[in-house]
Image (cartoon, coloured by chain):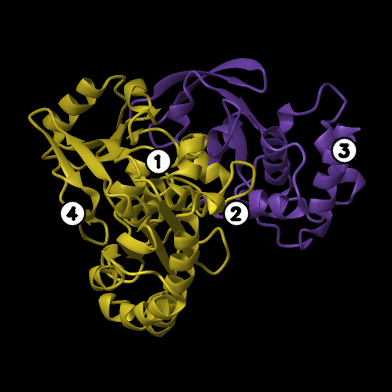
């Protein structure tokens, strides 16, 4: 099958790739760019493990055709840190032990960052509401919500 | 069929027109072929992964800038490719079209709402679509275009059954038009699902217009309780011209189950849906009726859900 050339920005870097029409963004990220922080969970848009930013908006990489990101800007969990300095949301997750197996964590952090942009001072209910598309099978969410609350609190200070 | 949701096994040719006329030309040319329209992909890609659809051509419409708009100057005009999350940034949706606002907030989760579109929600023709009952109670119309023709249909007349619409193969939904809401109108949308991010076991939208103490006009639409979204027209007639007292609302709830035809499926049972339809109708009518008084209208600060 004919391969389609695309150009995009990934974590601040310009890239070009040749993709098949049916290639998914998640597989472009993981198998070709080796950005394995973005996880394959359910593959049908129910778990949020593959959440990334496309042009600063949350998108599920498992339901996005790679060819559609032509000309777009993608940010994955690997693009959050500045050099060796983690993004403050990553720090807050670490400090609050909001990670058990860690599989859902990249998606959780991307979604939490998006929440903070839309609503910098959310109530616990608003946090739960916004995070409802990100499923965690270990922690029971308590530590994750604590981490997000602490981040919001620190940003206000 | 063994499903693998990690990849998309279906091979197809990808077509990404940049203008509407180009898209309509493609649909005209490929109408006898196995072509599908892709917008947000949150339904279609899931189906392509889990059901053998054998699509040969995929028409991606999200690069068509002229369809990515919302206009609120006269009613609502919603372009086919604007995502849900951008629509509800318009204050007018929350204050005037409250049931639509609540329906969009009830859809899945933020990432899905950044991807999915109202036109896609309609075109997918799921009886459980959340925006459809809400749009129907506001008398929404759908603009359908092809290279040869242009027609406008009431949304309620678009559906033939689950996944089936009256759309021809060369046609595209380009716009959803919703008339201006009449004064003293209140509306509400309620959905029951296993967890909030799930599809509806049953959903309901209600819009009522009050004149003095009485209900002048009433629209009730249920989703997930029949092959298509259904209007409860007998119940609407029962309520019109009367004050929506607790007794009347309770009487309406007793009869409403006769107007729906729910089945048992993976998400729920007919018995549950019938029982819930009564309770939900009472809640939605009370809420909508209260909102006909401007002081009970949702303000822009509070959350919708």
How far is mark 1 from mark 2, CA to CA? 20 Å
Q: For the residues carrying marks 1 and 4, which lies nearer the camera in this image?
A: 4
Disc 4 packing (10 Å; few <14; some 14–19; many ≥20): few
Residue at 28% x, 38% y: name it: B177
Number of the front mark, 1 or 2: 1
Task: Residue B215: give x, y in percent of width and height.
Answer: 34, 63
**Label 2: element kind:** loop
Foreground: B246 or B130?
B246
The residue beneath circle 1 is B117
Q: Quadrant of residue A87?
A: top right
Q: CA distance from mark 2 to mark 4?
A: 34 Å
Q: In the image, which is nearer the foreground, mark 2 or mark 4?
A: 4
Label 1 Cα crowd, 10 Å radius (few <14 / some 14-19 / many 20+): many
Vertical order, B84 against A48 (above or below): above
Q: Colour of chain B?
A: yellow
In the rendered structure, find residue B285 and report the number of the disc placed on it: none
Marks 3 and 1 sit apart, C-alpha to C-alpha, by 35 Å
Q: The residue tagged with tag 4: helix, strand or loop? A: helix
- Labels 1 and 2 touching (C-beta < 8 A): no
Asked whether the viewer can see residue B279, the reply is yes
Name the spot of residue B213 as percent of width and height, x first: 39, 63
Residue sitting at x 38%, y 27%: B68
Point out residue A101 in the picture as x, y percentages from the top left corner. 78, 55
- Which label is found at residue A47? 2
Classify A99 as above or below B175: below
Badge 4 is on which residue?
B157
> Marks 1/4: CA distance?
20 Å
Contact between labelled residues 1 and 3, with CB atoms less than 8 Å apart:
no
Where, by quadrant of the figure, is residue B40 drawn? top left
> In this orientation, which residue lies closer to the viewer: B163 or B119?
B119
Question: Which residue position holds label 3?
Answer: A91
């Amino acid at each position: 099958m004919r391969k389609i050339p695309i150009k995009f920005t990934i974590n601040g870097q310009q890239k070009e790739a040749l993709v098949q029409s049916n290639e998914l963004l998640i597989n472009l990220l993981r198998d070709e760019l080796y950005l394995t922080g973005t996880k394959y969970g359910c593959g049908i848009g129910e778990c949020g493990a593959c959440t990334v930013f496309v042009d600063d908006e949350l998108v599920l990489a498992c339901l996005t055709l790679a060819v559609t990101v032509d000309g777009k800007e993608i940010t994955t969990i690997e693009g959050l840190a500045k050099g060796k300095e983690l993004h403050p949301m990553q720090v807050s997750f670490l400090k609050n032990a909001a990670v058990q197996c860690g599989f859902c964590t990249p998606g959780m952090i991307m979604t939490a960052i998006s929440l903070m942009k839309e609503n910098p001072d959310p109530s616990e209910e608003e946090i739960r509401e916004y995070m409802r598309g990100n499923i965690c099978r270990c922690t029971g969410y308590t530590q994750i919500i604590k981490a997000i609350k602490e981040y919001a609190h620190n940003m206000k200070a | 069929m063994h499903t693998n949701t990690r990849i998309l096994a279906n091979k197809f040719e990808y077509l990404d027109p940049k203008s509407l006329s180009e898209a309509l030309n493609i649909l005209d040319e490929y109408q006898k072929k196995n072509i599908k329209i892709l917008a947000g992909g949150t339904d279609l890609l899931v189906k392509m992964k889990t059901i053998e659809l054998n699509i040969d051509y995929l028409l991606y419409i999200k690069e068509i800038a002229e369809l990515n708009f919302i206009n609120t100057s006269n009613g609502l005009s919603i372009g086919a490719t604007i995502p849900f999350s951008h629509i509800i940034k318009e204050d007018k949706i929350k204050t005037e079209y409250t049931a639509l606002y609540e329906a969009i907030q009830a859809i899945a989760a933020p990432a899905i709402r950044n991807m999915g579109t109202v036109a896609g929600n309609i075109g997918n023709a799921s009886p459980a679509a959340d925006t459809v009952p809400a749009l129907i109670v506001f008398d929404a119309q759908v603009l359908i275009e092809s290279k040869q023709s242009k027609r406008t249909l009431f949304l309620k007349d678009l559906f033939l059954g689950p996944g089936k619409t009256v759309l021809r193969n060369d046609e595209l939904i380009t716009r959803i038009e919703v008339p201006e809401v009449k004064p003293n109108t209140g509306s509400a949308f309620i959905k029951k699902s296993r967890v909030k991010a799930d599809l509806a076991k049953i959903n309901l939208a209600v819009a009522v217009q009050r004149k003095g103490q009485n209900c002048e006009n009433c629209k009730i639409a249920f989703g997930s309780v029949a092959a298509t979204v259904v209007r409860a027209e007998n119940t609407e007639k029962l309520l019109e011209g009367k004050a929506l007292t607790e007794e009347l609302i309770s009487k309406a709830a007793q009869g409403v189950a006769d107007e729906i035809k729910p089945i048992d499926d993976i998400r729920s049972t007919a018995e549950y849906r019938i029982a819930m339809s009564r309770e939900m109708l009472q809640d939605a009518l009370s809420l909508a009726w209260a909102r006909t008084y401007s002081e009970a209208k949702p303000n822009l600060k509070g959350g919708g859900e």
